[in-house]
Amino acid sequence: MSIDIETARKVAHLARIAVPDAHLPDLARELSGILTFMEQLNEVDVTGVEPMTSVTPMRLKRREDVVTDGGYPEKVLSNAPDAREGFFAVPKVVE
Amino acid sequence: MSLNELTIAEARDALRKGDTTAAELTGACLSAIEKAGALNAFVHHTPEIAQEQAAAADQRLKAGDAPALCGIPLGIKDLFCTRGVPSQAASGILEGFRPEYESTVTRQLFASGAVMLGKLNMDEFAMGSSNETSVYGNAVNPWKVDDRLLTPGGSSGGSAAAVAGDLCLGATGTDTGGSIRQPAAFTGIVGIKPTYGRCSRWGIVAFASSLDQAGPMTKTVRDAAIMLQAMAGHDPMDSTSADIPVPDFEAALTGDIRGKKIGIPREYRMEGMPAEIEKLWADGAAMLRDAGAEIVDISLPHTKYALPAYYVVAPAEASSNLARYDGVRYGHRAALGKGDGIVEMYEKTRAEGFGKEVQRRVMIGTYVLSAGFYDAYYNRARKVRALIKRDFDEVFAAGVDAILTPATPSSAFGLGEMASADPVQMYLNDVFTVTVNLAGLPGISVPAGLDQKGLPLGLQLIGRPWAEGDLLNHAYVLEQAAGFAARPAKWWLEG
């Protein structure tokens, strides 16, 4: 599978990483190289094999549906690049 | 011998006898760290916390309430969130992040009296095999045989360098594809990745959640047993943490492996494998045979597909885990231009904050999870992963107790030497270790000899799930038989 420049642009956007146009050819080449390496997986007969969901057979634990934590908004916000009046602040989303 | 050169077991015994104090031990390590700037192992120094914890440890020792790690100075990989102390996974995107909480593993270590000297260098988000993707710059291997600086391996490169350079008595590491075992092998120390679920992942910055495990990196197998004891255990905060008892690991070190069955997997005999690695492997098998174990040839037929499966599964999980770094809740936010909206904020922040290798893996992960490719790549890789695990299940069902393999395909290489190589070339470092993560098994790297250049080489033992005690015992026998006593010359102290 070879990735073209348009696909590289699309993947970068889906990953929310700004990639300048000038870097797209290199990126496409690198991604293609890695995908070619992965294509070895096509040699394996996986008929009837279930995809692994959990490496150790385990049932996820359940607990009472009660509040166990919280009540400290100042701690939650303490590392925010921009926090105002008890909220995370971001650029305007809706016009 | 300086106090910082002690093993954990030696220091524990000396502390309990009153031959030294936690304050003296901590002082010796802090002064060793100060002189070892050239190794770039410690990237955030916490001497005040260390001295405070040492004083508290001395109180507990005096009172006779001293768990094994009481007063033992450790280094903590930057991937672990430590309250109030920078914890940035060696990434620019977590610049300035000071967690309001403590990871479960470090909380347990501190509860048993351990002393934190500071945070250790690593590859960014644990993605790398040479510690060259770190925002702090390269960590440097204490081992040096010519004028080149060598990699300590990765991603736990700072942890390996700090332990091998006697800057601390032990260090925490994490291992997603070999990140404890490969750097341990490159620096002549011991590193164990426990069974998936043995140590809580809570408060450890996530890379690939189905593969990540924390473990100790130490000077000896006994030290690894002591430190793992304090790190392991069930934690309700991690839904994949196993609710099963933690046995006494140090008590498992009986040195008796008579009648045990050791498997030698034929698929690990790679084409072009250096003769000295092949010899080391054969020597290791002979040592275990001499100790009374039975050596059997085994087959793990899907081994060849472990690396490509890993490089689908790990980036897929990483792309999802790293979606949280968006410049909103913590860390870096890019300066925005006029008219930039929230999407530009995300894209610019992540372009500035993530290094090249992290960006590459996030994009690969995004691609293999995207509509149209999910089945072809991601689901296929998960099926192959199931087959890799089945290979191990069948071998263990046939009565094999442990599996012996080389830890790495080479000794430590020079920093910068892989810079122009294809990313896939760097991924090959994990060829012997990555199967263990995919199958969720415990694996340990034990220093076993020096190569012709005079650099350490390690052997890996792989154990049954939850049988870390048995695995450590096999490693202990190998360690005693190999008698690896070489130490790096402390070149960084000169000039």
Image (cartoon, coloured by chain):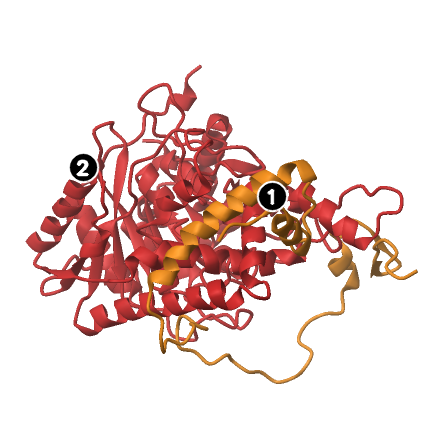
Chain colours: A orange, B red
Query: Is residue B7 depicted above or below B244 in this figure?
Result: above
Q: Quadrant of the C terminus of chain B?
A: top left
From the viewer's side, name the closer residue of B185 and B211: B211
Q: Which residue type does callout 1 highlight?
A: Ser
**Left-right relation of B112 to B103:** left
The chain under label 1 reads: B
Q: CA distance from mark 1 to mark 2?
A: 37 Å
* Image spot of residue B462 (x, y percent): 27, 59
Labels 1 and 2: the sequence-earlier one: 1
Q: Secondary structure at mark 1?
A: loop
Residue B165 seen anywhere in this rendered image of the structure? yes
Q: Of the residues shown, which amino acid type is indicated by label 2?
A: Glu
Residue position for label 1: B91
**Residue B318 point in image, percent of width and height:** 55, 57
Q: Secondary structure at mark 2?
A: helix
Foreground residue among B256 and B422: B422
